[in-house]
Image (tube, rainbow, N blue to C red):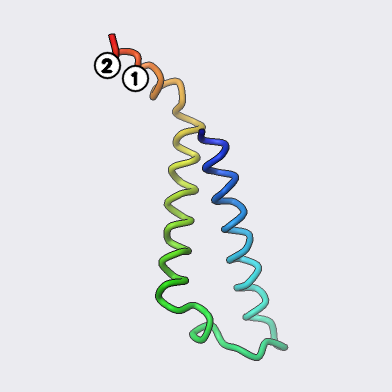
Amino acid sequence: MGLYVTSYALVDAIYYFSLWQIINSPDAYVGYHDFFTPDVKANVWATVVEFIVGLILIFKSKTIAKKYFKLSS
């Protein structure tokens, strides 16, 4: 589950980072404020949160599983 969430967030993060690099290049025709509208900024923040949750699921999987089994028994 953690690998799936992290890989999905990583693709989005690479996409937004690439667009940010393209926009900041000297040959770009649009500016930062033209592209990063409030809905795109919200998507970037959602990607950051998704990436953090995915990393937590990966690195704390044993702890989460132990707590889950303790609650179920």
Residue at disc 1, secondary structure? helix
Where is mark 1, residue-wise? Answer: 68
The residue drawn where x is 44% and y is 70% is: 41
Where is mark 2, residue-wise? Answer: 71
In-front residue for pair 69/31: 69
Q: Callout 2: few (<14), some (14-19), or many (20+) C-alpha neighbours within 10 Å? A: few
The residue drawn where x is 54% and y is 51% is: 9
Task: Determine whether 35 is above or below 57 in the image.
Answer: below
Q: Which mark is residue 5?
A: none
Residue at disc 2, secondary structure? helix
Which kind of residue does numbered mark 1 sit on?
Answer: Tyr
Residue 22 position within the rendered picture, expressed as x and y whole percent measured from the top left: 67, 77
Residue 61 position within the rendered picture, expressed as x and y whole percent measured from the top left: 46, 26
Residue 2 position within the rendered picture, expressed as x and y whole percent measured from the top left: 51, 35
The residue drawn where x is 57% and y is 36% is: 3
Task: Determine whether 71 is above or below 32 in the image.
Answer: above
Total numbered badges shown on the rendered structure = 2
